[in-house]
């Protein structure tokens, strides 16, 4: 009998050239969400990673955080376009609300 191929594709793990943590926010006593900038070896793009991390203890009983699958990663240029569009729309709404309250 022939083996069935797995429906899940194997992913290649890219090596990180550098990673900069931009901001961390604690969401639960055992969890943080982290915004970071990541650069991979052999890739021309920077990426923005928004990911949840779960707290654990190392051998010396220090807190360490391990990444979870829960998160998203976008090219930095696309992330900035999304954020810029959001802030522009937000400012326009605020200006329209101010204009309508003054009349």
Image (cartoon, helix red, strand yellow):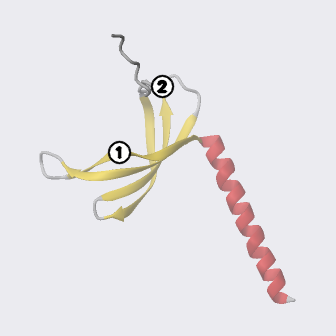
Which quarter shows the N terminus? top left
* Front position among marks 1 and 2: 1
Callout 1 touching callout 2 (CB < 8 Å) = no
Residue found 22% across the figure and 51% down from its top: 56
Q: How far, Cα to Cα, is label 1 from label 2?
A: 20 Å
**54 relative to 18 in the view: left or right:** left
**92 w.r.t. 99: above or below:** above
Disc number placed over residue 85 in the picture, else none: none
Q: Residue 22 placed where, x, y %?
A: 47, 52
| CA neighbours of label 1 inside 10 A, class few (<14), some (14 to 19), many (20+) | some
**103 w.r.t. 68: above or below:** below
- Viewer-nearest residue: 42 or 12: 12
Q: Residue 29 placed where, x, y %?
A: 29, 64
Residue found 50% across the figure and 45% down from its top: 72
Which residue appears farthest toward the left when viewing the image?
60
Residue found 74% across the figure and 63% down from its top: 89
Disc number placed over residue 67 in the picture, else none: 1
**65 w.r.t. 5: above or below:** below
Q: Which residue is mark 2?
A: 41
Which residue appears farthest toward the top when viewing the image?
1
- SS for dot 2: loop
- Viewer-nearest residue: 26 or 41: 26
Q: Residue 19 placed where, x, y %?
A: 44, 39
Which quarter shows the C terminus? bottom right
């Amino acid at each position: 009998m022939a083996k069935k191929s797995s429906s899940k594709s194997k992913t290649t793990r890219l090596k990180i050239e550098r990673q900069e943590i931009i901001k961390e926010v604690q969401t639960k006593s055992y969890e943080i969400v982290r915004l970071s900038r990541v650069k991979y070896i052999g890739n021309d793009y920077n990426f923005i990673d928004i990911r949840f991390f779960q707290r654990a203890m190392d051998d010396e009983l220090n807190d360490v955080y391990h990444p979870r699958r829960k998160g998203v990663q976008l090219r930095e240029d696309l992330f900035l376009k999304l954020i810029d569009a959001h802030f522009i729309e937000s400012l326009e709404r605020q200006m329209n609300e101010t204009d309508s309250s003054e009349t």
